[in-house]
Amino acid sequence: MLEFAKLSFRLLRQALGRRVGLLVVVVILGLSTAVLEGTGIGLIIPMLSIIAGGAEPSGMAGLSAVFQQVGAGLDERARLIVIAAAILGLITLKNVLAFANAVLTNLIYGRAGHAMRSSLARQLLTVGYSFFLQQSPGRLLNIISNESWRASDAIQTTLAAIVNASAVVILLAFLLLLSWQMTLGVALGLVIIQALHALLSASLRAPSRKVTSFNGELAAKMLHLVHAGRLIRAFGQEQREKAVFDTSSDAVREAGFDLQSRQAVLPPLTEVLHSALFLTVVVSAWLWGISFPVIVAFVVLLYRLQPHVRALQMAWSAVQGWSGSLEEVRWLLDPSDKPNPPAGDAPVQALRQHIKFDGVTFKYPGSGSRPVVLRAASFDLPKGHSTAIIGRSGAGKTTIVNLLCRFVEPDGGNILVDGTPLNQIDPMQWRGQIALASQDLELIDGTILENITYGHSASLEEVKNAARLAEAHEFIEKLPDGYETVVGYRGATVSAGQRQRIALARALVRDPEILILDEATNAMDGLSEAAIVETLKSRAGRRTTIVISHHRSTISFCDEVVILQDGRVKNQTSFAKIATLSMDQLYELEKASS
Ligand SMILES: Nc1ncnc2c1ncn2[C@@H]1O[C@H](COP(=O)(O)OP(=O)(O)OP(=O)(O)O)[C@@H](O)[C@H]1O
């Protein structure tokens, strides 16, 4: 519970920044509201005394005696009117302050919720990329779309608890000043009720974690239905997928029902216990001989205290019920167990000689007993050359791209850029030198123009030139909306080959120092691919290009070839030497030289 309160306060501090003093204003407003309420109720004492016949009631002491003196110099009629007006004034002022406090707490709640979502987004954008290779997208989606809202609610509940706690303190003080004996009885009763409540609330944590975990699984199933629509239909798996989804959804329902049923016990139980306490105090007060107006004022105060106490208790149980959500949000925000983003502050110089892989070893984090992916891989990517990296499926080609872009870092060996270890170079500046067109680098849900200029501002003419080089201009111009055509989620409204051409234009418009094409043209028709290869050939020597492909034609313009097998570099040779060999023969060559 304390950890959650700490997390709530951390988020509140973060949300309010230098305006963290607003929390003090919330407390002051809460206290003031309760003082006004207590005073208004206290004025019932002289009012009832007048109505009951004007006789001075006996046995009054402390605060009740002070209230009894209000308007003492006035005649009965005027006194009654003045007291009634004062009570109304106090009630009005109290409600104005309560309204101000409600607006303020809503403002803080909104800011805290925004701060939390913004922190989650920052974490997802800055965490080392390998985090995404290990985590279930369903879990992450569930945290952002579901759990963060529940955590916001927990923050709102914490804020409301501050206001309610202020009211409880003040109203208890009034009660104490009216009758310490009755207050002692009330306090004892409240402690017993709270102990019982805390015991029951603690039992909510396990079911809450269960709900969170099932929600994560359900979110993964939802993602699957959205992404795998074609696959499911192609293999006729609609019924099976429906059954799998229903089972997952039903598990969420069942866990949710269990949690809500346990939570539902608390309000009626608390009400019964509070009523019992309430009646016990009234009967005891009468037996103790406490005067009627004081008993009435006490009972009214107690009556007004009750919702605040209940709200505090409900806040306690609600936060326990959201503990699973808060734990998930806290986990995602906690940087200590997440991979660090790539570091380094050496400025990037224009490549002078080469990028050198020197004995690089790598295994994907969290891949358990699976074999090492790159084994002491050494090869050169000379400046201004086009180098093809080839090898059978799973040989480690894309992994080399991941290492070059610093999405992952080597476990052993070094990647040297003109002799400087890549891990010392400023990663943002380094990535600014690279343009990547890859089969699994999606399009954004926007227009073709927005996609080509993603991360790089360019004039329309520059965009069109890049599109021409990528063999995309012609088909784009034929679309009714041209460059303003919306491509939809992940480019769903254009063909695979068109998607690749837009992605290639996006890489080319940056006119990068280093161009990486990872199966970037494999969905294109032969003519388009040949035209692109011709373009790249005509620009040979102007930039350093790395090409990964299983197609002989795609690598035909390259100067060098690096042949990989099972994560080892089998060979690095000039393309001219093997120009006559087919891809199969190149793979044979691998075997021959092993
Ligand atoms: N996120 C990951 N976690 C664990 N292992 C992975 C991960 N990504 C790839 N691998 C493994 O690393 C090895 C190399 O994968 P990589 O994608 O680099 O191969 P590739 O040569 O590009 O293959 P392809 O030609 O099929 O694209 C494979 O055995 C693959 O199963």
Image (cartoon, helix red, strand yellow):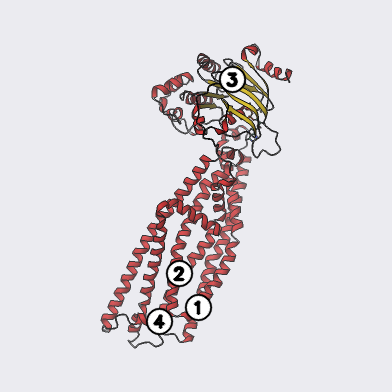
| Mark 1 neighbour density, 10 Å: few (under 14) some (14–19) many (20 or more) | some
Is there a contact, CB below 8 Å, between mark 2 and mark 4? no
Q: Is mark 4 within 8 Å of ligand 1?
A: no
Q: Is residue 242 visible?
A: yes
Q: Which residue is mark 4?
A: 62
Pointer 4 or 1: first along the chain: 4
SS at mark 3? strand
The alpha-carbon separation of the residues under discs 2 and 3 comes to 74 Å
What residue is at 48 percent from the left and 52 percent from the top?
Answer: 11
Residue type pointed to by label 3 = Thr
Instruction: Give the label, 4 or 1, closer to the camera.
Output: 4
**Image quadrant of residue 172?**
bottom left
Amino acid type, mark 4? Gly
Number of residues whose C-alpha sits closer than 10 Å to that of mark 4, classed few (under 14), some (14–19) or many (20 or more):
few
Work out whether mark 2 precedes mark 3 in sequence or the reverse, and give the earlier one: 2
Residue 20 against residue 66 in the figure, above or below: above
Q: Left or right? Give the position of 557 relative to 51.
A: right
Question: Which numbered disc, 4 or 3, marks the residue that appears first in the sequence?
Answer: 4
Q: Which mark is residue 500?
A: none
Query: Which residue is tagged 1?
Result: 184
Residue denoted by label 3: 387
The residues tagged by marks 4 and 3 sit, at their Cα atoms, a distance apart of 92 Å
Mark 2 and mark 3 residues within 8 Å of each other at the beta carbon = no
